[in-house]
Image: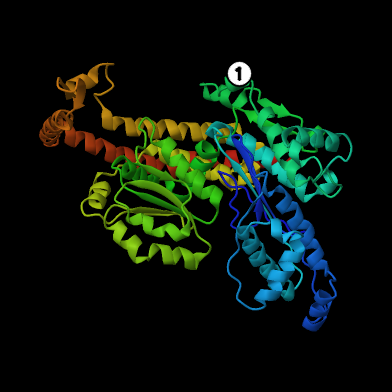
């Protein structure tokens, strides 16, 4: 059997279509099942001869067993058959007859089901002519999972997928019996089908396993309260606490994650975004979002696109994004960039040609003239909007944050290490990151939050400070915020500040201060190239070599 399975930030995307089954609950498992189609070595005459003699080919027999199972369940609503695409008009009568024979009792089957099965049967015959084929596509959709628990569920789902890829790892005794009992309690109508087999978990048992995972994957209240110490030294050196869940009885590997749990968007997404577009690009991007300008995040994988898009929402703290948010936008919906509503959206590109076609799309270019900016995770560039006035304002008002630049260099150093789990999404949600990496990311968040909070200075000086920037509307009984009352004091303060600095710049005191800076710079250069600096450098090199030679 072939298997195509992927994990993304919100599950995996499965474009195929066949038979699907979904049960209720916040954790749904949708899966699709294809059937092995053996190559038909006989020619067309031999097929017709078999049909006239009421003989069944291997394909017809397999299809009859399948359709009987589907049709018998159609009344219960357990299975839903989705139509396939049109496959041509050749051999319509033969295919209709063959499909009806395969279904067993055509008179009891609704016309709609008969048409759908006929179309599916023709599709299977056409595929069989091309050669052996097997399609097994599965999709795991997580609904209602908090962001802070995503890594835990990703870990469990990855273990589940690994087990299905390696059926020999499943226990054929106790685990299989328990899974079957759980399945029958959840799906009593499926008592006669799909029992646990030696070659893997049955289709119905997936739902039982996922239901069990949903109930087991929960942190205790004491574990939920675990947080990183405020002290930087304690953050790095404090003993690590872990969440451990042994799922070997179900045939799954043991889950062991550090506490607090690794944050998919708050840590891995932030690190990916920060390392790609750097500190200056990230600050400009956040300012664009504060102005409610649209942002399109493009990348090569679903995990990096969705994690980076979600990280932007968290980095806006203490503000809340009030417009559209679509972490993964299908490529067919690229025209959405022309929406007048501000949005944060992500899109996956297949290759460089696809990326080039998106960036140079006429609709995208037009949207960039109206406020759209693009985060190119492939090349690590931020393409700022060409909206008149906005780009010039951001460029002229931009100021570097030295502290943020230092943290960027530190994070770059950690990322270059081969042992860093930031280099792999799968390693990240399975193992977490080091205390030094988590401390650096926490400091980056603190610096960014402090920088963004300066734009609301005066509003949070006191608990009721906001009242002086608005008026009470007696007609509606609500408070109406007046932007002019907030901006005018800032303008007055800025004008007086500029006047003061202009007068100060012409004083002898200020000129003397500049001269002192010049002398300090020259003396620093002399010290760094002098004999004392060389002696210190030689001493450090000697001790470094001794340390690493042991």
Left or right: 524 as drawn, with respect to 22: left
Instruction: Tell me the colour scheme of the image.
Output: rainbow
Q: Position of residue 152 (x, y in %)?
A: 63, 34
Q: Position of residue 300 (x, y in %)?
A: 53, 56
Q: Would you place residue 65 above or below residue 157 in this image?
A: below
User: Looking at the image, which is closer to me, 126 or 169?
Assistant: 126
Q: How many marks?
A: 1
Q: Residue furthest front?
A: 107
Q: In the rendered image, is residue 492 in sight?
A: yes
User: Looking at the image, which is closer to me, 472 or 61?
Assistant: 61
Q: Residue furthest right?
A: 173
Residue located at (23% from left, 21% from top): 466
Residue located at (84% from left, 50% from top): 199
Give the structural element (helix, strand or loop) at label 1.
helix
What residue is shown with label 1? 221
Q: Position of residue 121 (x, y in %)?
A: 69, 66
For disc 1, the neighbor class at 10 Å (few under 14, some 14 to 19, many from 20) is: few
Left or right: 48 as drawn, with respect to 294: right
Q: In the rendered image, is residue 127 in sight?
A: no
Q: Quadrant of the N terminus?
A: bottom right
Q: Quadrant of the C terminus?
A: top right
> Looking at the rendering, which quadrant does residue 237 occupy?
top right
Q: Would you place residue 540 above or below residue 348 in this image?
A: above
User: Looking at the image, which is closer to me, 550 or 536?
Assistant: 550
Q: Position of residue 319 (x, y in %)?
A: 35, 32
> Looking at the rendering, which quadrant does residue 515 occupy?
top left
> Looking at the rendering, which quadrant does residue 250 occupy?
top right
Residue located at (71% from left, 32% from top): 212
């Amino acid at each position: 059997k072939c298997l195509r399975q992927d994990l993304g930030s919100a599950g995996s995307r499965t474009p195929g279509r066949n038979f699907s089954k979904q049960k209720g609950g916040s954790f749904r498992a949708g899966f699709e099942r294809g059937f092995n189609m053996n190559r038909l070595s006989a020619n067309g005459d031999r097929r017709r001869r078999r049909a006239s003699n009421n003989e069944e080919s291997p394909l017809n027999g397999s299809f009859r067993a399948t359709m009987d199972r589907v049709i018998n369940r159609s009344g219960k609503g357990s299975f839903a058959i989705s139509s396939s695409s049109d496959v041509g008009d050749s051999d319509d009568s033969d295919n209709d007859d063959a499909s009806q024979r395969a279904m067993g009792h055509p008179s009891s089957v609704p016309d709609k089901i008969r048409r759908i099965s006929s179309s599916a049967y023709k599709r299977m015959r056409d595929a069989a002519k091309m050669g052996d084929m097997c399609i097994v596509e599965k999709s795991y959709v997580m609904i209602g999972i908090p962001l802070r628990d995503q890594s835990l569920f990703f870990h469990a789902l990855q273990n589940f997928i690994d087990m299905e890829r390696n059926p020999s790892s499943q226990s054929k005794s106790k685990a299989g019996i328990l899974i079957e009992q759980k399945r029958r309690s959840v799906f009593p109508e499926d008592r006669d089908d799909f029992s646990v087999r030696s070659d893997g978990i049955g289709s119905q048992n997936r739902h039982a396993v996922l239901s069990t995972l949903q109930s087991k994957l929960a942190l205790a209240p004491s574990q939920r309260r675990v947080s990183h110490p405020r002290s930087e030294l304690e953050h790095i050196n404090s003993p690590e606490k872990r969440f451990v869940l042994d799922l070997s009885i179900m045939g799954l590997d043991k889950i062991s994650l550090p506490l607090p749990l690794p944050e998919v968007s708050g840590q891995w997404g932030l690190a990916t975004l920060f390392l790609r577009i750097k500190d200056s690009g990230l600050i400009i991007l956040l300012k664009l979002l504060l102005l409610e300008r649209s942002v399109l995040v493009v990348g090569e994988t679903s995990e990096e696109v969705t994690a980076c898009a979600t990280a932007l929402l968290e980095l806006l703290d203490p503000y809340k994004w009030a417009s559209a948010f679509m972490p993964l936008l299908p490529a067919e919906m690229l025209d959405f960039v022309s929406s007048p509503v501000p949005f944060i959206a992500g899109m996956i590109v297949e290759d460089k040609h696809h990326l080039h076609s998106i960036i140079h799309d006429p609709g995208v270019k037009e949207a960039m003239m109206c406020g759209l900016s693009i985060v190119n995770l492939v090349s690590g560039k931020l393409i700022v909007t060409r909206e008149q006035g906005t780009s010039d304002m951001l460029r002229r008002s931009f100021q570097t944050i030295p502290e943020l630049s230092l943290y960027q260099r530190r994070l770059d150093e950690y990322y270059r290490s081969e042992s860093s789990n930031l280099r792999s999404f799968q390693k990240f949600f399975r193992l977490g990151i080091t205390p030094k990496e988590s401390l650096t990311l926490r400091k980056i968040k603190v610096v960014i939050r402090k920088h963004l909070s300066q734009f609301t200075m005066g509003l949070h000086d006191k608990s009721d400070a906001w009242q002086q920037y608005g008026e009470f509307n007696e007609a509606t009984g609500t408070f109406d915020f007046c932007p002019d009352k907030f901006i005018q004091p800032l303008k007055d303060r800025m004008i007086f500040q500029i006047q003061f600095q202009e007068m100060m710049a012409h004083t002898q005191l200020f000129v003397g201060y500049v001269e002192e800076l010049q002398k300090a710079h020259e003396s620093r250069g002399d010290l760094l190239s002098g004999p004392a600096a060389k002696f210190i450098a030689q001493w450090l090199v000697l001790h470094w070599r001794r340390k690493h030679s042991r």
